[in-house]
Image (cartoon, rainbow, N blue to C red):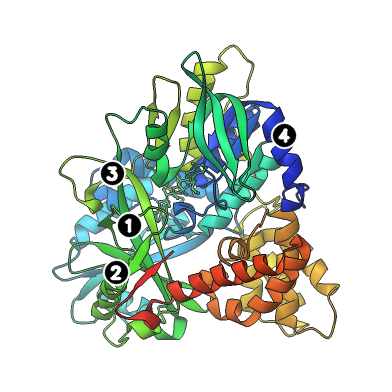
Amino acid sequence: MALHGFSVTFREQLLERLRSERFDVLVIGGGITGAGIALDAVSRGLKVALVERDDFASGTSSRSTKLIHGGLRYLKQLEFGLVKEVGSERAVVHNLAPHLVIPEKMLLPLSEGKSLGYLITSLGLKLYDWLANVKKADQRRMLTRPQTLRYEPLLKKDFIKGGAIYAEYRTDDARLTLEVMKKAFQLGALCVNYVAARDFLYEDKHIAGARVIDELTGEELDLQATAVVNATGPWVDDLRTADGSLSGKHLHLTKGVHIVVPRERLPVQQAIYFDVNDGRMIFAIPRGRVSYIGTTDTNYQGDKDHVVATVEDAEYLIRAVNDTFPSVHLSLDDIESSWAGLRPLIHEEGKSASELSRKDEIFESSSGLISIAGGKLTGYRKMAERVVDLVVDRYFAEHVLRECFTHRIRLAGHTFSGYQDVVKYREEVARQLSDVGLDARTAEYLVANYGQQTNLILRNFLQQDAALDKDLALILSELWFCFHHEMIVTLVDFFLRRTGLLNFDIMRVERWKAEVTEELARYSGWSAERKTAEINALDALISEARIGNRQGQTASR
Ligand SMILES: Cc1cc2nc3c(=O)[nH]c(=O)nc-3n(C[C@H](O)[C@H](O)[C@H](O)COP(=O)(O)OP(=O)(O)OC[C@H]3O[C@@H](n4cnc5c(N)ncnc54)[C@H](O)[C@@H]3O)c2cc1C
């Protein structure tokens, strides 16, 4: 289950290979789209390199609502094809990583004057289940008013006229991206973070690779490839511009913000998808010791590298919660953490942010650059299949390559035969942890994050100094695992994208950041200056995430 070589320790060897070898496909961008393409291409037999200019999943793929969902609201926009594809993908992605893509029943309250009618909702959800081929036990169930209020007693009672329960899945977007990336690497794709594409290389006006820069040393290298895929999400048009091919359709970025509050401040009993006064819908999702709320959807023209969650964004979400759950009285001071991300959508003249389609689209330039934009986390596998089909068609039609079979490539080395196995494994981990005084929530967190890779973490944990605080020993074991098997380069990589702690357990970050920094500095051989820079970068993110501490200012990530 351990993945050899996916560690910064091997960075020099990986860069040397990037420098000296020729690749069938170069993928630029290490979000879920790039990771999916790398896995699909390498598993079919192509020689693949992937470069990510920051950390894997540092773009939109760590800033989503973290749902593997069919997109119920796209039914309203009559996007049946999209709902069918992403809806069907939910069960597929769940089977690929059942510990990480976890079934989550969603409550849809229907309220007077805001929601669609009971009958239309009932028919809509039936269609949703049918399009996505949802198995009988998981199909939607309509609820009466008293039933809805029993499911969620916090709801504003006066206006509720009924509700529905339907099936979705929740995940951790950054970890899903990372597990897809790790699998691609394991099958032979050369995936490296902190390497940015600066320019393209051409032979006879046809794209033939890219000039990239090692962001850690500033060294430039030329990377030769037959096909080049631009999977840079919100930055797709920047690379199309560098290729001189930005014409016709272009990106339209919209910003989405999430806020995180302690569970006791919004003790919803389960995930809930509710109407807002302006006609939009937002989620409130309980997760471990917190609940998170999102999202906004506003046009964005600002700095893509510095996405800002304003106090105004947070106030919009708080107002929506307080209108729907009147006894809660959330305020900015309740916000523990937050994040903001950009949707890389395709522009359509005259449409508002919320009306824009979430469908993906592929652009092929006259130089041969293949760019992909739009889409959803949930549909990453099918997007990758379409891109790789095109690459094969253009360049490798004469070769004997396998058809796409990523629906059968399990992630995170799991051997679970179904979700029941995950539950049993989680109970077993909880038993082991309770022997050393750690609670069941820790087991839930470990298994959701790492699946059966938790065994490696626990093995390391048992070898730690018995005198250490147990929670510290555990986080150091997570660090050991992520350093040796998950290509962390910075402190933020660990605290934000490998563990999700900066989003969902910021207290744990504050509690152990000094000790974790020391240990990572020891592994990485950091100088005193580098250590200070790493701590400063982490502290900046912590204070930015806490919108409530900075009323009248802005938060950025
Ligand atoms: C607020 C919000 C909520 C969402 N919620 C959901 C949800 O619940 N479920 C769902 O299915 N979808 C959701 N989505 C959509 C989903 O998150 C995105 O479709 C998906 O993450 C996009 O992934 P990507 O890989 O295309 O882009 P990104 O994740 O942004 O990856 C692009 C990568 O390219 C890198 N890059 C840029 N330029 C270069 C360069 N020159 N060289 C090398 N690398 C470069 C960037 O650093 C970045 O990491 C949500 C989106 C938003 C914004």
Question: Mark 3 and mark 2: span between their CA atoms?
Answer: 22 Å
Q: Earlier in the sequence, mark 1 or mark 3?
A: 1
Q: Position of residue 218 (x, y in %)?
A: 61, 46
Residue type highlighted by circle 1: Lys
User: What is the total number of numbered labels drawn onto the structure image?
Assistant: 4
Give the residue number, with chain letter if any, for mark 1. Answer: 255
Answer with mark 3 or mark 4, whichever residue precedes in sequence: 4
- Tell me the crowding category of disc 4: few under 14, some 14 to 19, or many 20 or more residues within 10 angstroms, Cα based: some
Q: Quadrant of residue 466?
A: bottom right
Q: Which residue is mark 2?
A: 313
The secondary element bearing badge 4 is classed as helix
Q: Earlier in the sequence, mark 2 or mark 1?
A: 1
Q: The disc labelled 2 sits on which kind of residue?
A: Asp
Rate crowding at label 1 as few (under 14), some (14 to 19) or many (20 or more) other CA atoms within 10 Å: many
Residue at label 3? Answer: 357
Q: Nearer the viewer, residue 407 or 511?
A: 511
Q: CA distance from mark 2 to mark 1?
A: 10 Å
Q: Is residue 406 visible?
A: no
Q: Amino acid at mark 3?
A: Ser
Q: Given this view, does label 1 or label 3 mark the residue nearer the observer?
A: 1
Residue under pointer 4: 17
Q: Which mark is residue 223?
A: none
Q: Position of residue 247 (x, y in %)?
A: 29, 29
Determine the residue positioned at 33% across, 63% down. 295
Would you say 439 lies left or right of 266 here? right
Classify mark 1 as within 8 Å of ligand 1 or not, answering yes or no.
yes
Query: What SS does tag 2 mark?
Result: helix
- Residue at point 46%, 82% (across, down): 262
